[in-house]
């Protein structure tokens, strides 16, 4: 069995770095979502389509980073309870966080899918790419529940 590492006792720098590296890579992969979309669309579509993806991906990148930041709250709360040797309360924090973010994910999905036209208008999407931006926001918005779930599970782990 491997050595147990703790952020509450002894030297924490190496343990903190080992903890931070997977988080960094997860955030990096999430940042690539829009870039990969642009790469694929750029190979097979028109300029207006690329513009729609570029405009929409900025919104989705912002939403993803906000969700990631909020789910870090679960990480902090669970870590605090585990550090205090109160695993039952850590479990309650996990359960409460999952319920809270499930509701947030559903609301976010409804807002992004239903309000895509309004949001694209607020973002001042170019007229020639407006419909493409709306479509991209709707497609990604429909999957936002999965983005929220991924980040909640990442925050828990």
Image: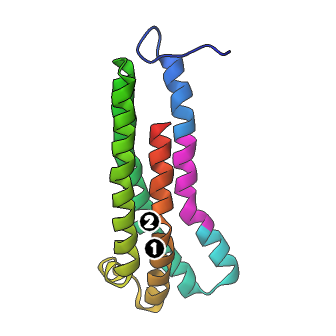
Q: Residue furthest front?
A: 88
Q: Residue furthest top?
A: 10
Task: Tell me which residue sits at (66%, 73%) in the image.
Answer: 40
- Count of numbered tags: 2
Main secondary structure found in the magenta portion: helix
**Disc 1 to disc 2, C-alpha distance:** 6 Å
Label placed on residue 60: 2
Task: Tell me which residue sits at (38%, 42%) in the image.
Answer: 95
Magenta span includes 64: no
Mark 1 in CB contact with mark 2 (< 8 angstroms): yes
Judging by the rendered image, the residue that carries numbered circle 1 is 56
Q: Report the side of 147 relative to 78 (left or right).
A: right
Q: Quadrant of the N terminus?
A: top right
Badge 2, how many Cα within 10 Å: few under 14, some, many 20+?
Answer: many
Using the image as rendered, state which of residue 82 and residue 43 is in the foreground. 82
Using the image as rendered, state which of residue 72 and residue 45 is in the foreground. 72
What SS does tag 1 mark?
A: helix
């Amino acid at each position: 069995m491997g050595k147990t590492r703790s952020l509450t006792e002894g030297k924490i720098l190496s343990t903190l770095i080992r903890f931070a590296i997977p988080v960094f890579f997860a955030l990096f992969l999430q940042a690539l979502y829009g870039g990969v979309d642009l790469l694929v669309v750029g190979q097979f579509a028109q300029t207006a389509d690329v513009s729609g993806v570029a405009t929409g991906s900025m919104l989705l990148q912002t939403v993803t980073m906000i969700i990631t930041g909020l789910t870090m709250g679960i990480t902090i709360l669970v870590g605090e309870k585990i550090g205090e040797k109160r695993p039952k309360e850590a479990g309650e924090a996990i359960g409460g966080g999952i319920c809270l973010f499930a509701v947030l994910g559903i609301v976010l999905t409804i807002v992004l899918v239903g309000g895509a036209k309004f949001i694209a208008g607020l973002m001042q999407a170019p007229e020639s790419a407006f419909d493409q931006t709306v479509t991209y926001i709707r497609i990604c918005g429909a999957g936002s529940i999965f983005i929220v779930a991924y980040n909640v599970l990442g925050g828990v782990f």
